[in-house]
């Protein structure tokens, strides 16, 4: 399962934005714990630094989570913790990809997409070893109409 989280803009310098993003991360981790066993990752742009998010920091410090980016050299790459910045960004973003141990077995390679054309920063990409089975859930049923 992959959770894609985009944090509040400016979480690295705005305590309220950081707290809101941390709250979102906390909810993701609660859902994470309720899911069936299996590989799980949290990806996206948190718009802050690890120190801004206590829920994530606690998970990493207690070894409940591992950061695949911090061990990227295990996959034949140097540390990928800094991505190139674009002119409108004041500092380069850090890269982090929290996962559980089962998801570590998925990882084959990491690389940085320097040609993503995003105005803020490059994109950290992960290649998986092979295609994993996909499950379909009918947990959510959308109404035929809102009227």
Image (cartoon, rainbow, N blue to C red):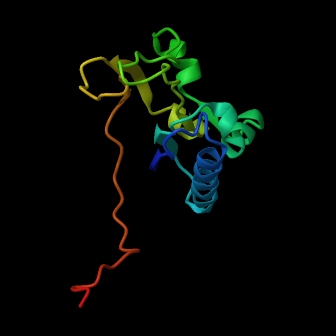
Residue 116 screen position, x and y as percent:
25, 25
Give the quadrant of residue 121: top left
Q: Please name the residue shown 52% across and 33% down the image.
A: 97
Q: Please name the residue shown 57% across and 40% down the image.
A: 11
Toward the viewer: 95 or 77?
A: 95
Answer above or below: position of 70 versus 63: above
Q: Please name the residue shown 58% across and 47% down the image.
A: 17
Q: Residue furthest bottom?
A: 147
Answer above or below: position of 79 versus 43: above
Residue 60 screen position, x and y as percent:
70, 35
Give the quadrant of residue 61: top right
Q: Report whether 81 appears left or right of 2.
A: right
Which quadrant of the figure contains the C terminus?
A: bottom left
Q: Please name the residue shown 41% across and 21% down the image.
A: 110
Q: Report whether 3 appears left or right of 132.
A: right
Give the quadrant of residue 100: top right
Q: Report whether 15 appears left or right of 142.
A: right
Toward the viewer: 130 or 88?
A: 88
Residue 114 screen position, x and y as percent:
29, 17
Toward the viewer: 78 or 91?
A: 91
Q: Report whether 54 appears left or right of 130.
A: right
Toward the viewer: 89 or 67?
A: 89
Answer above or below: position of 136 versus 100: below
């Amino acid at each position: 399962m992959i959770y894609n989280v985009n944090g509040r803009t400016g979480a690295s310098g705005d305590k309220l934005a950081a707290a809101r993003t941390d709250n979102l991360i906390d909810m993701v981790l609660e859902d994470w714990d309720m899911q069936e066993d299996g590989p799980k990752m949290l990806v996206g742009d948190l718009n802050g630094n690890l120190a801004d998010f206590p829920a994530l920091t606690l998970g990493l410090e207690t070894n409940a989570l591992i950061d695949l980016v911090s061990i990227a050299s295990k996959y034949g790459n140097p540390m990928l913790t800094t991505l190139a910045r674009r002119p409108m960004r004041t500092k380069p973003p850090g890269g982090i990809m929290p996962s559980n141990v089962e998801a570590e077995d998925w990882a084959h390679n990491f690389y940085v997409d320097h040609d993503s054309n995003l105005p803020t920063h490059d994109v950290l990409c992960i290649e998986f070893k092979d295609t994993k089975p996909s499950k379909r859930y009918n947990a959510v049923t959308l109404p035929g109409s809102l009227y």
